[in-house]
Structures are given as C-alpha cells and as structure tokens.
C-alpha cells in the first residue's frame, strides 16, 4: 500500500492497555479532569456492572414467576367441549391409584399439570421480559464500550463490579427453575 506507513507505531488510539486518568467515557464531554473525577467514573462503572448482574437476577426471578403462574393457572371448561373427566381418563400422563385417608379408600386418578416448554404469548409476561432484556443489552453494551477504551482502571472497574454484583445477587439465581 503506497502512501501509508504500515510500520508506524503511533496512532490516535493504541490497541494496548494504558493507565491514563483522562480517558473519555462515552463522549468527549465525559473526560475526567482530575484523579477524583477519574475515581468517580470508575465507581460509576462498578455500579453499572452491579446493576447488570441485578438485572440478570431480576430476569431469572420474573421468568420463574411466570412459569409458576402458568403451573397454577386454572382452566375453565367450555360448553360443547369434551368433559374434563373424559380428558383425564384418556390422558397418558395420568395414573390411577387408591387413596386412603382416615380409613376411607377412594379410587383416584393423578394427573400431571401440563406445562409446555414454550408458554403461549402473554403481554403481561413477554412485554416486561422484552423491556428488561433491552435494558440488559444496553447496559452490557455500555460496559463493553468502557472496556474497549483499553483503560486499565475502567477495565478493572467493570470486572470488580461484575464480581461484586455476582457476589450480591448470584445466590438468588440458584433456585430458579429452568426448563
């Protein structure tokens, strides 16, 4: 390539980590001008990373709540439809047995609650899920842009916030039902 110096090691933005305290974040107007402003920017990034972990936990909680709600949903028998007793009798997921309580025996049929892996579309569930996922993507991209500045302080702030967020919220994801 003529006209360009491929051996040049200077450029406007190097592809190596550096430790300057005046690195712009997100715009030229957000350029720390002192060590205190730089520390404030790093604290902001830590809080943003913690917020991202909190949003993931909130999403897992809302998803589990939606599945729990689907399991508890009651269905109404519609006129001119097959009676529920006939449906249960022909259901492959049901089993018959004898239930004994207080010396009284009854023939019963146990039916498993039908839950599909993919629930039907519901505005009350899917709209908040989509909005929350949009927030998660936006915060994730903002953190990615901070890391892409190659500023060591910004990078370590994002990692520290991720660690602190997982430490604070990670245990709440343990009991979440996944299908």
Image (cartoon, rainbow, N blue to C red):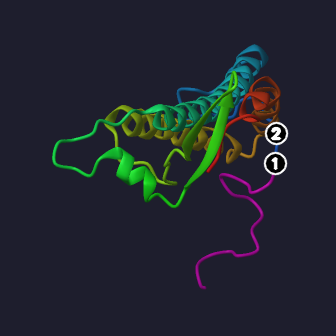
Residue 147 percent location from the top left of the image: 70, 43
Residue 128 percent location from the top left of the image: 41, 32
Residue 5 included in the magenta stretch of the image: yes
Mark 1 lies on residue: 17
User: Where, by quadrant of the figure, is residue 33 drawn?
Assistant: top right
Which stretch is magenta? 1-16
Within 10 Å of the Cα at label 2, are there few (<14), some (14-19), or many (20+) other Cα atoms? Answer: some
Question: At 70% across and 27% down in the image, what residue appears?
Answer: 50
Asked whether 61 or 11 is in front, the reply is: 61
Q: Residue furthest bottom?
A: 1
Question: At 48% across and 32% down in the image, what residue appears?
Answer: 72
Left or right for 159, reference 45? right
Residue 133 included in the magenta stretch of the image: no
Q: What secondary structure is found at the residue carrying circle 2? A: helix
Q: Earlier in the sequence, mark 2 or mark 1?
A: 1
Question: At 78% across and 23% down in the image, what residue appears?
Answer: 168
Residue 64 percent location from the top left of the image: 58, 35
User: Where, by quadrant of the figure, is residue 19 drawn?
Assistant: top right
Q: Residue furthest top?
A: 36
Q: What secondary structure is found at the residue carrying circle 1? A: loop
Callout 2–callout 1 Cβ contact below 8 Å: yes
Q: Is residue 137 above or below residue 51?
A: below
Within 10 Å of the Cα at label 1, are there few (<14), some (14-19), or many (20+) other Cα atoms? Answer: some
Which quarter of the rendered picture does the N terminus lie within? bottom right
Q: Which mark is residue 50?
A: none
Q: Which mark is residue 152?
A: 2
């Amino acid at each position: 390539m003529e006209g360009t110096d491929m051996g040049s090691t200077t450029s406007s933005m190097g592809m190596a980590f550096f430790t300057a305290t005046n690195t712009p974040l997100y715009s030229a107007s957000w350029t720390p001008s002192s060590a205190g402003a730089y520390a404030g920017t790093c604290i902001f990034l830590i809080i943003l990373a913690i917020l991202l972990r909190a949003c993931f936990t909130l999403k897992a909680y809302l998803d589990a709540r939606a599945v729990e709600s689907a399991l508890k949903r009651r269905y109404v028998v519609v006129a001119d439809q097959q009676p529920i007793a006939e449906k249960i009798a022909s259901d492959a997921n049901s089993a018959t047995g004898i239930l004994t309580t207080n010396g009284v025996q009854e023939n019963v049929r146990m039916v498993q609650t039908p839950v599909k892996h993919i629930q039907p579309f519901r505005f009350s569930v899917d709209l908040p899920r989509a909005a929350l996922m949009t927030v998660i993507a936006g915060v994730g991209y903002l953190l990615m842009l901070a890391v892409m500045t190659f500023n060591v302080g910004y990078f370590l702030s994002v990692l520290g916030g991720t660690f602190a967020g997982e430490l604070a919220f990670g245990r709440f994801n343990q009991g979440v039902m996944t299908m």
